[in-house]
Amino acid sequence: MTFAFWEIAAGGILPEHDHPHEQVAILLEGRFELTVRGETSVLVPGTVAVIPSHARHSGRALSDCRICDVFYPIREDYQRLNSLVPPEAVRPRATS
């Protein structure tokens, strides 16, 4: 498993994408609009969202947010994550 902790500024966008990993997103603070397979919901603190493998999903921070994402299997690509994400939008800390 890979655990990733995100701090996302209000208005930050997560472009639509998919990946082979199963994902569980837990909203710790703020409000986050999440769309999974065309179904949109607003996450509030304590909300847990399950994103199946290969499901198209996207999101938008409605306020400053803190999110914990859990992925299985391990996200090997997160080893180089800090060089891929614009720091003004998202400040990640990923651990495996």
Image: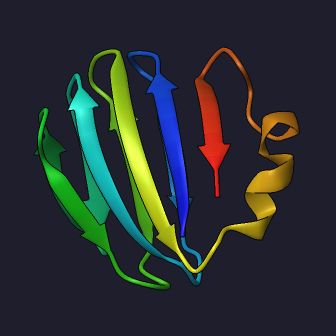
Q: Is residue 38 left or right of residue 68?
A: left
Residue in the picture at 59% in, 76% down = 19
Residue in the picture at 51% in, 59% down = 16
Figure check: 23 above or below 43: below
The quadrant in which residue 60 appears is top left
Q: Is residue 61 left or right of residue 7?
A: left
Q: In this view, does 75 lie to the left or right of 53?
A: right
Residue in the picture at 26% in, 69% down = 50
Figure check: 73 above or below 95: below
Depth check: give the residue in front, 91 or 93: 93
Q: Position of residue 87 (x, y in %)?
A: 71, 20
Colour approach in the figure: rainbow
Q: Is residue 71 left or right of residue 76?
A: left
Quadrant where the N terminus is found in the figure:
bottom right
Q: Where is residue 53 in the image (x, y as percent from the top left)?
A: 45, 85
Quadrant where the C terminus is found in the figure:
bottom right
The quadrant in which residue 43 appears is top left
Depth check: give the residue in front, 35 or 90: 90
